[in-house]
């Protein structure tokens, strides 16, 4: 089957190069298929089956209060959200990040 596909013009060289479970990008570097996220508050891994987890991008503002095009990303696990602690956690995380990036305001 491979010979007939190669004769038809399909490039199948990648079949012998890559090991099972690996993936290469356009530059030929091996990249992972799945990169797990960690909860920004608890540092626990967020599994693929945690359907209650969220990832939020919080925009940065300039001195006049206008969005400047950059943002900070926070991931919160479903366990934190189910206990009702996600709001408090996000407030603390954003306060620390705001001080880190030097964003003033209210």
Image (cartoon, rainbow, N blue to C red):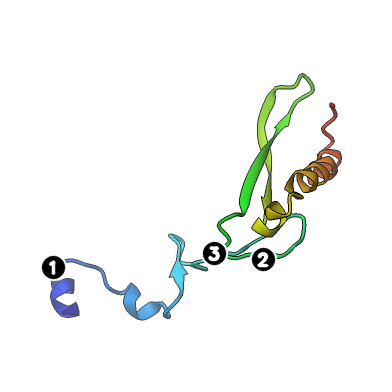
Occupied quadrant, residue 90:
top right
The disc placed on residue 39 is none
3D distance between C-alphas at marks 3 and 1: 41 Å
Q: Is residue 7 left or right of residue 37?
A: left
The disc placed on residue 8 is 1
3D distance between C-alphas at marks 2 and 3: 11 Å
Q: Which residue is mark 2?
A: 45
Q: Which residue is mark 3?
A: 49
Q: Is residue 25 above or below residue 97?
A: below
* Crowding near the residue tagged with mark 1, few <14, some 14–19, many ≥20 C-alpha atoms within 10 Å: few
Q: Secondary structure at mark 1?
A: loop
Q: Secondary structure at mark 2?
A: strand
Name the one closer to the observer, 47 or 103. Answer: 47
* Extreme residue in the top direction: 64
Q: Is residue 3 left or right of residue 64?
A: left
Q: Is residue 67 above or below residue 46?
A: above
- Identify which residue is drawn at 64% across, 44% down: 56
Closest to the camera, between mark 3 and mark 1, is 3
The spot of residue 44 in percent (x, y) is 71, 65
């Amino acid at each position: 089957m491979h010979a007939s596909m190669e004769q038809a013009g399909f490039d199948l060289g990648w079949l012998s190069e890559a090991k099972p479970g690996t993936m290469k990008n356009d530059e030929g570097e091996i990249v992972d298929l799945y990169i797990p996220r960690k909860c920004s508050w608890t540092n626990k891994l967020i599994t693929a089956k945690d359907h209650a987890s969220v990832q939020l991008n919080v925009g940065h503002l300039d001195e006049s209060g206008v969005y400047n095009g950059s943002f900070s990303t926070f991931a919160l696990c479903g366990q934190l959200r189910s206990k009702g602690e996600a709001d408090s956690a996000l407030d603390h995380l954003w306060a620390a990040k705001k001080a880190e990036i030097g964003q003033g305001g209210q």
